[in-house]
Image (cartoon, rainbow, N blue to C red):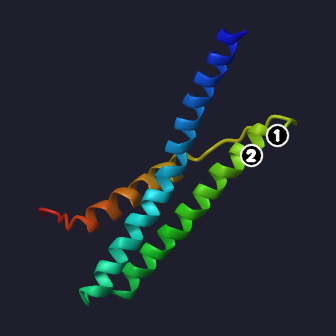
Amino acid sequence: MELARVGRVAVMGELAASLAHEVNNPIGAMVTNASVAQRLITGGKVETEELNELLADIVADGRRAGEIVQSIRNMVRKGKERRSLIDINDTIQDLLRIIHAEAVGRDVTSSN
């Protein structure tokens, strides 16, 4: 009985770590984008279009974090399993937005 309990605790620990990672990704992206926006405003380098893009990214990442939390809640609830198709292009665009925000935040420039 104790061995079964230890097994359940280990599985719950792995699940918690995985969920934390999934939720931290969009939250980290939101913090990065907000930091970049703050630096641009403080430095007087703010362009309306770039600021608007950063804010749009923050909104999208906030929604993504909400979707992850909702998926977790749905997983825990009893009921019919729900599956859905994802557009890989959207996933790649999300990744590019995160990378762009990181690059801007670290003052990375193109060599072109």
Q: Residue 81: x and y, percent?
A: 80, 34
Assign a secondary structure to mark 1.
Answer: loop
Above or below, comparing residue 43 to residue 76 in the picture: below
The residues tagged by marks 2 and 1 sit, at their Cα atoms, a distance apart of 6 Å
Task: Identify the secondary structure beneath mark 2.
Answer: helix
Residue under the point 33% across and 73% down: 36
Q: Which mark is residue 73?
A: 2
Q: Quadrant of residue 8?
A: top right
Which quarter of the rendered picture does the N terminus lie within? top right
Mark 1, residue position: 77
- Which residue is farthest left? 111
* Amino acid type of the residue tagged 1 in the rendering: Arg
Relative horizontal placement of residue 66, taking residue 47 as reference (left or right): right
- As shown in the figure, which amino acid type bears the numbered disc 2? Arg
What label sits on residue 16 in the rendered view?
none
Where is residue 39 drawn, in percent x and y?
29, 79
